[in-house]
Amino acid sequence: MPLVSLAATIDAGGMLAGGEVLYYALSAVDSAGNESVQSFVVLASIPAGSNTNSVILRGLSFATGTAGFNVYRGANPQQMRRIASNQAPATSFTDTGLPAQAYAPPDPNFDHANFYWRMELQPEYPATIVTANTVGNGSAEMGNINYAGMIVRIISGTGADQEYAIASNTATTLTLTQAWAVQPDATSHFVVAEAAWHFGASAKTSPVQFEIPNETGVTLHIQGRGANASNLEGPPLLCTLTQWVIGGGGTADLAPPPAPLFGLGPAVGPGGIVLLSAVSFSDFTNTHSVTAGTLTVYYWNELTEKSPYSVASTMGATDTVLNLSPAGSATAGSFVQIDQEVIQVQAVQNGGLQYQVGRGMHGTSAATHQAQVPVYQLSSQVAVVPFAPEFFGSPLSGAWAYPVPLPDTRIASAELFVTNSKGNGPAGSMNLTATIDSGLRTLSGGQYSIQVSGFLAVDSTPAPVLVVEAAHAVRDMYAVVGQQPVGGSVQLNIIRNGTIYCSLIIADGTVISERVNGFGMPLAEEDQLSLSITGVGPTSPGSDLTVILRL
């Protein structure tokens, strides 16, 4: 056993805080690595004030054959940890605030260690409710379980390592059978555990192995207690406690899944189908038991005429109030689209003439919007998508796609979250507004064609009337001729229910007109479509006209 002066010196030039009381002890180590018992314990009381202190231990003396020495420090003599290992023999040692290591001092009474385990019944919560004999959290859900007779333990923060029996509990608060020795505060975290410990194993050397119930996701408290040859153990509250989550073989989900990445696009073939595909994660943690995904699509119904709402006055990129004309009918929590930005309505004010909004939702960017720009009030549709267990990471997931029928809409954005055995994960989102159409148009597929054979002439009814059999959104409209006009253009109007619906021009010397975008120009069931030719080329009028409306 080494000798040391019991009078520690307090000096500057370190990182030890003022107002602390610390305890030190030394042990000697020989050339074979054998460690002696501890020296006498040295008390070091650091004055309050400066937090740049150091402690000097003087009068060190070692027996012949000492190769080095170890230094231990703690807040009390029973809970010391090593701060320096294998120091060369010297007459003094300075602690500048060295970090504690995972080594306890040697114990001459140690013969073996006993290991115990118990189940954690309530997961860790911060202590937001505290009195002299209670602890709790306002968001805890303990009302349907009676924890009377169980143990509450302060895992970290003020009052750490205290544990007491529970007398009763409500949904949010645990009442103890006695008062706290050190009352917890907002820094404290607590758990509820079984009152009784289960014996695991006894051993003199590591590793130690014992059996526990294989209940996936359950947290265990594991504690080892030093014992002497008579099997008298050290105090449990001074022994290290470790929390361990049972993995169930290493592939179980221990928490809700992360937010997914995903793709959304039109299906190949018949219109009106949007495909959810490429659902993926940055890694497969907590995705093994995923069984479902919930997709929410936000869209504008294209069978509705152009939006009746518009921006009443210019809206800056940082503005959080949207002024409308006329008053809107959105509700708090819904979404609107302006240009290529998706905006969430947080509150409706002034009878619907103003919305308090959140900007740049679902990955869109907040931008300036000019007055009179349309405001599209988005609808939503939810689809629940099934997944087989262990689906993600399997070969099947690479080519997977799920069809969602949603014809005649313009999709602005979408959200997707997935659900595993532990609950719902956070939602991932994507936006589709950065396109020429400011969204993904699903349409319904097909087309209407109006044909006029032979040479063209000015004519108000060159073809029979076409009757629309069902409502449709229109992708675009254009006209083609078999023989190009010469000397002038072919000018024509598509007439809907007696009113001009769209005007098209086939320029002199060309065979096809410009395409007219059909967004905001839906066709209703039983609409009557006809054609009127209002001008032809004087040298050659062109021939064999076909007018196409793509759906």
Image (cartoon, grey):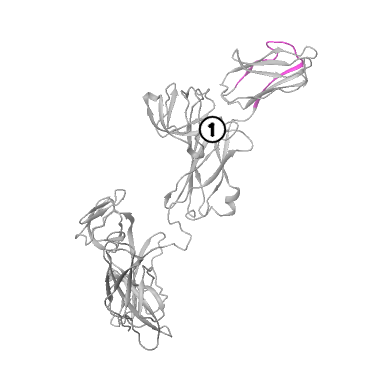
Residue 455 spot, x, y in % from top left: 78, 15
Residue 373 spot, x, y in % from top left: 51, 25
Q: Is residue 354 left or right of residue 154?
A: right
| SS label for mark 1 | loop
For the point 47% across and 63% down, the residue is 249
Q: Is residue 313 left or right of residue 135?
A: right
Q: Is residue 527 left or right of residue 168?
A: right
For the point 50% across and 44% down, the residue is 385
Residue 434 spot, x, y in % from top left: 57, 35
Q: Is residue 487 visible?
A: yes
Say which quadrant the C terminus sits in.
top right
Residue at the limit of the structure toward the right, as seen here: 539
Say which quadrant the N terminus sits in.
bottom left
**Foreground of the two, 282 or 201:** 282
**Looking at the image, residue 291 lies above or below residue 524:** below
**Looking at the image, residue 411 lies above or below residue 491:** below
**Looking at the image, residue 13 lies above or below residue 337:** below
For the point 36% across and 73% down, the residue is 94
**Foreground of the two, 196 or 314:** 314
Q: How dense is the environment of label 1, judged by Cα within 10 Å: few (below 14), some, or many (20 and up)?
A: many
Residue 237 magenta-drawn?
A: no
Q: Is residue 201 visible?
A: no
Residue 463 magenta-drawn?
A: yes
| Amino acid identity at mark 1 | Gln
| Range shown magenta | 447-468
**Foreground of the two, 13 or 326:** 13
**Foreground of the two, 253 or 364:** 364
Residue with the mark numbered 1? 340
